[in-house]
């Protein structure tokens, strides 16, 4: 089984020129996602696992392999903040 990554419920997502403003209603907290974090967030639709998301973002931005850890760290941060959830299937 793989861990698929999906957006958490109860998020109000607002597109702004430099990324997203995400309001997390359950925690009454506002998050500011820069353009890169917003694109990573977009790939998290519950249909992809972490490695697939990292690979797609790396391809989209033509990132060197050493930068894959940065994408992975961003995903972990979004998960730790409760904006994304891991679901097993």
Image (tube, grey):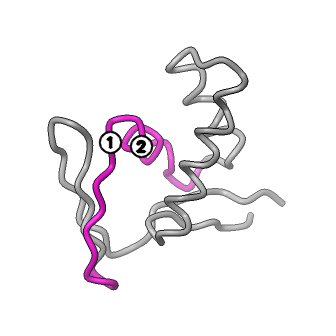
**With respect to residue 89, does 51 lie above or below?**
above
Residue 84 x %, y %: 50, 63
Check if residue 43 falls in the magenta segment.
yes
Residue 14 x %, y %: 18, 53
Residue 27 occupies quadrant: bottom left
Residue at (72% x, 59% y) in the render: 3
Q: Quadrant of the N terminus?
A: bottom right
Q: Which residues are magenta?
A: 25-47
For the image, the number of numbered tags is 2
**With respect to residue 85, does 65 lie above or below?**
above
Residue 10 occupies quadrant: bottom left
Provide the residue designation for mark 1. Answer: 34
Q: Residues within 10 Å of mark 2 (few under 14, many from 20)?
A: some
**With respect to residue 63, does 24 lie above or below?**
below
Check if residue 32 falls in the magenta segment.
yes
Q: Residues within 10 Å of mark 1 (few under 14, many from 20)?
A: some
Label 2 and label 1: CA atoms lie apart by 5 Å
User: Circles 2 and 1: CB distance less than 8 Å?
Assistant: yes
For residue 11, the mark is: none
Residue at (33% x, 36% y) in the render: 35
Provide the residue designation for mark 2. Answer: 37
């Amino acid at each position: 089984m793989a861990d698929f990554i999906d957006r958490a419920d109860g998020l109000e997502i607002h597109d702004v020129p430099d990324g997203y403003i995400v309001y997390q209603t359950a925690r009454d907290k506002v998050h500011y996602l820069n353009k890169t974090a917003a694109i990573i967030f977009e790939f998290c639709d519950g249909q992809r696992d972490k490695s697939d998301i990292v690979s797609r973002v790396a391809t989209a931005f033509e990132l060197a392999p050493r930068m894959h850890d940065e994408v992975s760290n961003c995903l972990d941060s979004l998960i730790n903040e409760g904006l994304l959830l891991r679901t097993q299937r």
